[in-house]
Amino acid sequence: MRVTFLLGEVANGIRRNASMIISVVLVSMISLFFLGAGLLAQREVSVAKGFWYDKIQVSIFFCTNQSTQVQSCTGGAATKAQQDQVKSQLDGMKPLVERVYYESSADAYQRFKQQFRNSPYLSDVSADSLPASYRVKLSDPDKYSDVVDAFRGQPGVEAVSDQSRVLGTFFKLLNVVSVGAVGLAAVMVICAILLITTTIRQVAYSRRRQVSIMRLVGASATVIYLPFVMEILVATLLGAALAIGLLWALVHYGVEGLFNTRGSGGDLVSMIGTQDVWDFAPWLVAGAIVIALATAWLTLRRFLRV
């Protein structure tokens, strides 16, 4: 088959069935967009875990004069001896305890003023109301409960908090989002397959006379099938290109633009970037090709028996 003839047939077919081809483009774009979003969400989970698990801490907050309702703080503010006792216990928990940072009430107040400098309630907080604390970096973040259980309820200790609980909820949420996106993508892929099947049937019916003539002159199945397949392939590839473009815009303007700007969260959370979109782009294109070729060929074999 001559290439010019094939391209002419494909162009004519797309022009004659523009509305159906546009439908295939849109449903392909939506399904591949959600598939890409699910893959990016899974990568974000992996990136975020690697970032946060390296920095996960357990914070041990000491009693202040305002901690009267806490059972372990009935004696008032934590004494120097109680703080030294906690430090000694932490030193004895090495190598699980990799590093210990001490933050005094004054240091905590300075950090609070920096973080909440625009808050109208800043004037209501004093250095005495913020507890001193030990911030503990663990060599194995999965064993955070060993440290938490050792100091919770100890005299002079008001509270022990671990970031892993918050992060665990965060990671679960990301996993739910990614699974949901992939699940929705699977539904949209099914819709795309059904729409492609319907499109091919309608196009084949509209060209039944042309196909009959080609059969009479002895055209092979490949010659008859190929224009149909190429039309669907062009539509799904265009849908894949649009999906990749939308994902790039989402990551560039949404993730990188909002989160990776210093002062707006990017200095705290390591997020995915546009390079991740390009990493997944070949897989989305490959998925579009597989969907188009498999669906088109199987449908044509059923409805255009040569």
Image (spheres, helix red, strand yellow):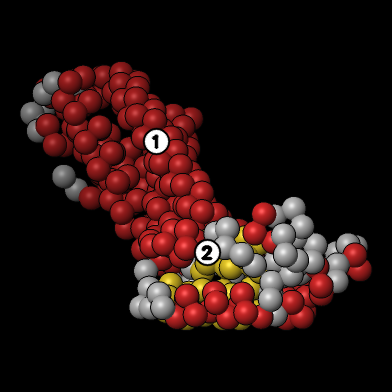
Give the residue at x 43% y 35%.
Answer: 184
242 and 108: which is toward the camera: 108
Image label count: 2
Q: Earlier in the sequence, mark 1 or mark 2?
A: 2
Percent coordinates x, y for residue 159 in the rendering: 62, 60
Residue marked by disc 2: 151
Give the residue at x 25% y 32%.
Answer: 295
Determine contact: label 1, label 2, CB under 8 Å: no
Percent coordinates x, y for residue 191 in the rendering: 39, 28
Residue 248 shows in this picture: no
Question: Depth-wise, is mark 1 or mark 2 nearer the camera?
Answer: 2
Q: Is residue 89 left or right of residue 203?
A: right
Residue 183: give its label: 1
Percent coordinates x, y for residue 267 in the rendering: 60, 74
Residue at disc 1, secondary structure: helix
Q: Amino acid at mark 1?
A: Gly
Q: Judge whether 260 appears above or below 9 on screen.
A: below
Q: Name the image quarter holding the N terminus.
A: top left
Q: Judge whether 232 appears above or below 147 on screen.
A: above
